[in-house]
Amino acid sequence: MKNLIYYFSGTGNSLAAAKLIARQLGGCEIVFMKGEFTPAAHYERIGFVLPCYAGGAPKPAMQFLKSLPLAGDSADYVFSVITCNDSGGDASFMLDKILKQKGLRLNYAKTVRMVGNYVALYAIPQNADELLQHADAQLNSIAAEIQQKAQTKPPRRHLYFTAFYGIGNQFFRVKERQMQASDACTGCGLCAQLCPVGNIAMKDGKPEFLHKNCTQCMACLHWCPNAAIDCGKQTARRGRYHHPAVKAGELK
């Protein structure tokens, strides 16, 4: 494979984006940013496709990147695509900072608005299909630019996103303690299989939330086949969502 894309995804937005870009590039491997992975010595392009959480990059994705054996000669060209509900925040800046420590830098950084899934704060938008159509059009243009190795300005840090990231992750610690499964749960175990940080264990046929590493990706809530998982009382009436081009099995 001459191209490599790393992604992080809960409900499939970033995986769908990574798959679309990979199809256009050709010769592309796609790797979930969890567990361990040893890349080849060199690629023509290395990309990172991930969501913006609380104004920055998901903490598990950053931990994965820090441990990744990359060096200055690992790729000719490095890009990032941040999927988001509203803003990409400092996610690309955070990526670039770690890459520079490894002798690399982002040559290209773009943000794509997709369907927001954080129902702990807001409902799934009614124009989800329209948002995804617009996102696909934008991603096709982005993929063409990546194919041509287009350049963008280096990502900049924004102090208000830095502050928001700290506050947001503290808020996540509060919300993770509100994750719960109702009597509608059948004990299928899909939530535990999908949790990218191993924060759910099955006990006596029911999910037990361990309250230790939750990144509030909402994968467990949105993929539950019986809508049995909620975060507090409000999420039950705020809808469920996962990207229509992604199957749950792709995120295990």
Image: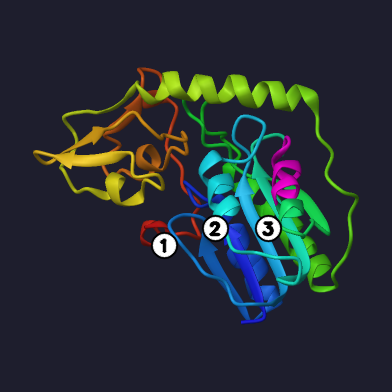
Single out the residue that lies furthest toward the left. Answer: 204
Q: Which residues are magenta?
A: 89-98
**SS for callout 3:** helix
Say whether residue 121 is visible.
no
Please identify, in this view, whether the residue under mark 1 or under mark 3 is nearer the observer.
1
Q: Secondary structure at mark 1?
A: helix
Q: Which residue is mark 3?
A: 136
| Location of mark 2 (residue) | 15
Q: Nearer the viewer, residue 177 or 234?
A: 177
* 115 relative position to 37: left or right: right
Q: Residues within 10 Å of mark 2 (few under 14, many from 20)?
A: many
Tell me residue 101's x, y (percent): 73, 51
Residue at screen point 47% across, 35% down: 215
Q: Amino acid at mark 1?
A: Glu
Question: Could you say which disc has been placed on residue 250 in the image?
Answer: 1
Cβ–Cβ below 8 Å for labels 1 and 2? yes
Relative image position of residue 112 (x, y in whole percent): 71, 48
Q: Is residue 117 visible?
A: yes
- Image quarter where the C terminus lies is bottom left
